Amino acid sequence: MKLIVKSKSSSLHHKLIAFKNDINGTYENIKKDLKEDLLMSLLKEQGYIYAYCMKKINQDNSTIEHIIGQKYKDGNIDLGKENELKYENLLAVCLGNSCKELNCDKSRSKYQEKRPLYVNPLENRIMTNIKFTNNGLIFYEDFIEIDKIKEFKNHNSHLESENIKYDIQKILNLNCNDLKEKRKVLIEALKKYTNNWSDKEKIRKKLQIYELKYNSEYEELCQVAIYFLSKKL
Ligand SMILES: [Zn+2]
């Protein structure tokens, strides 16, 4: 997962507010050209990768997701409706078809009514605690075996860290086999390239490549590489 820094000065931010206020617009009746501009702005902001799986995305293989789900209600408060046209609540996402079972927001959709998203990619505090095992598993804070992650009533625990672990494992299905294997291949290639992590010069050079955007784009799985390379310096 990768931190997303939302641009407060984005023109889309203002266009969406105007659309909502001037003509009582809703996300459902958003105009085609506004939606296209919106997706482009989100893609650019994210360096053309998706925060959760870090897959490369572009206009043709992405869609727009709501961090606070459109149907999410907190008691009587319709938070979904309140936030559906807020720029800071929107992300460009992959199509969720990386694994045999669904992943990312496709996997999340069936939980959206009752559960907010805890593993919020806009929160630096959370993103800095996202880690990976040598085998390519993604986890939060301390690694626990997958089958030890508890099932919660309404998919909610009173502990934030448990909710985040549950999001990663169950809600977004980020440890599905294909995603895990993809990460593992990258980790092994980096290990080999840096002679068992011993060549500090090569580590530094690679780290730069994964930290920066080239032609506005991040490398696929960049945060996996950054996690391992910076640990080995
Ligand atoms: Zn994805």
Image (spheres, helix red, strand yellow):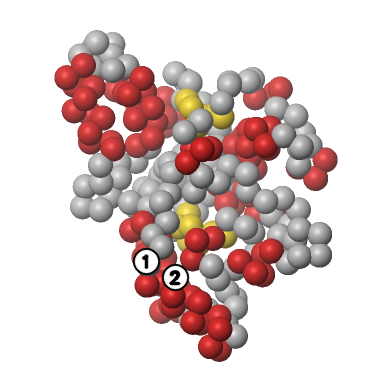
In the rendered image, is residue 220 in sight?
A: yes
**22 and 26: which one is in front?**
22
Residue type beneath disc 1: Ser
Q: Quadrant of residue 193?
A: top left
User: Residue 9, labelled with which disc?
Assistant: 1
- Asked if residue 206 lies left or right of residue 8, the reply is left
Ligand 1 neighbours mark 2 (CB distance < 8 Å): no
In the rendered image, is residue 170 in sight?
A: no
Q: In the rendered view of the protein, which quadrant contains the C terminus?
A: top left
**231 and 144: which one is in front?**
231
Residue for point 50% across, 77% down: 17
Q: Is residue 153 above or below residue 138?
A: below
Residue 66 position within the rendered picture, expressed as x and y whole percent measured from the top left:
57, 60
Residue 177 position within the rendered picture, expressed as x and y whole percent measured from the top left:
53, 31
Q: Secondary structure at mark 1?
A: loop
Residue with the most extreme bottom position: 23
Contact, mark 2 vs mark 1 (Cβ under 8 Å): yes
Residue for point 63% across, 20% down: 144
At label 1, counting other C-alpha atoms closer than 10 Å, the crowd grade (few under 14, some 14-19, many 20 or more) is few
Residue type beneath disc 2: His
User: Residue 201, labelled with which disc?
Assistant: none
At label 2, counting other C-alpha atoms closer than 10 Å, the crowd grade (few under 14, some 14-19, many 20 or more) is some
Distance, label 2 to label 1, CA atoms, is 7 Å
Q: Secondary structure at mark 2?
A: helix
Residue for point 64% across, 20% down: 145
Identify the residue under disc 2. Answer: 13
Q: Is residue 56 above or below residue 146?
A: below
